[in-house]
Amino acid sequence: MTKTPAEIELMAEAGRLLASVFTHLDGLKLAGMSTLQIDALVERFIVDDLKARPASKGQYGYGFVLNSSRNQVVCHGVPSPDEILCDGDIINLDITLEKDGFIADSSKTYLIGEVARPARRLVQTTYEALWKGIRAVRPGATLGDIGHAIERHATKNGYSIVRDFCGHGIGREMHEAPQVLHFGKPGSGLRLREGMVFTIEPMLNQGRRTVETLDDGWTVVTTDGKLSAQFEHTVAVTRDGVRVLTLRPDEARQAA
């Protein structure tokens, strides 16, 4: 489950490129666009501008570059020409990128136009929960420490943690060991060691934590129809802490 320093540098380059995809999206007006249009422009940017490969396309038979999970969609939303982003929406865009044989994975929930205060609060708390988990990463800590940090922040703010999906090891394959749960007990689970690389990707719901998969076999939604938000980063365990391989330029203060 550990990577060599050279492998981690290759993953960091994939992560840097992936971060630039989100920077590119940050500069676009997403309102009025269909999720299929966003998928197409992200594919062009990855392939033509970055000279990299969109790793999700073709993985497990999936036909698109990204997952677009809007409002009550928890994860794995499928881009569609009929799904138009509107003022007040929230949408998670989950993107993977492969460069020189290694994969990086990250996601961000976007606020579209004027978003109601409860939705903004959910998105902000989810982002904070991600960083609570990241800051628990260090050699000698456990996976339970990560999950507990995330769960504690979510529940104290009145949100539930989706338990059906988790973070994962990543490298030459998109999904490797270990599984990284977003709930847990301090000191429990696998002990972290230098060179491990995995994703942390909490999903917080406004209501109940229960979810269901729609008939398309991909799209996962909240069972109560309430909003869900997610953020994700790929991280590496370092000698004395953590390195966020998919860190975006606007997050420098978070990582300090």
Image (cartoon, helix red, strand yellow):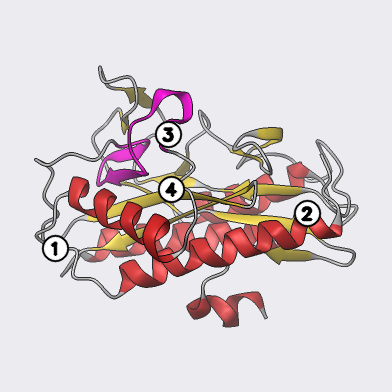
Could you tell me which residue is drawn at 90 percent across and 52 percent down? 140
Q: Residues within 10 Å of mark 1 (few under 14, many from 20)?
A: some
Q: Residues within 10 Å of mark 2 (few under 14, many from 20)?
A: some
Disc on the earlier residue, 2 or 4:
2
**Which residue position holds label 4?**
159
Q: Amino acid type of disc 4? A: Tyr
* Distance of label 2 from label 3 (alpha carbons): 36 Å
Residue farthest to the top, as pictured:
215
Disc 4 from disc 1: Cα separation: 27 Å
Tell me if residue 85 is in the magenta stretch: no
Alpha carbon separation for disc pair 3 and 1:
28 Å
Q: Which residue position is annotated with label 3?
A: 209
Question: Which residue is located at x 52 percent, y 53 percent?
Answer: 232
Q: Is residue 189 visible?
A: yes
- Element carrying mark 1: loop
* Sequence-earlier tag: 3 or 1: 1
Distance between mark 2 and mark 4 Cα atoms: 37 Å
Which residue matches tag 1? 31
Q: Which residue is mark 2?
A: 7
Q: Which residues are magenta?
A: 57-77
To which quarter of the image does residue 188 belong?
top right
Q: Which percent across, then down, holds residue 88?
A: 15, 60
Which label lies toward us, 1 or 2? 2
| Kind of residue at badge 2 | Glu
Indicate the amino acid at tag 3: Arg
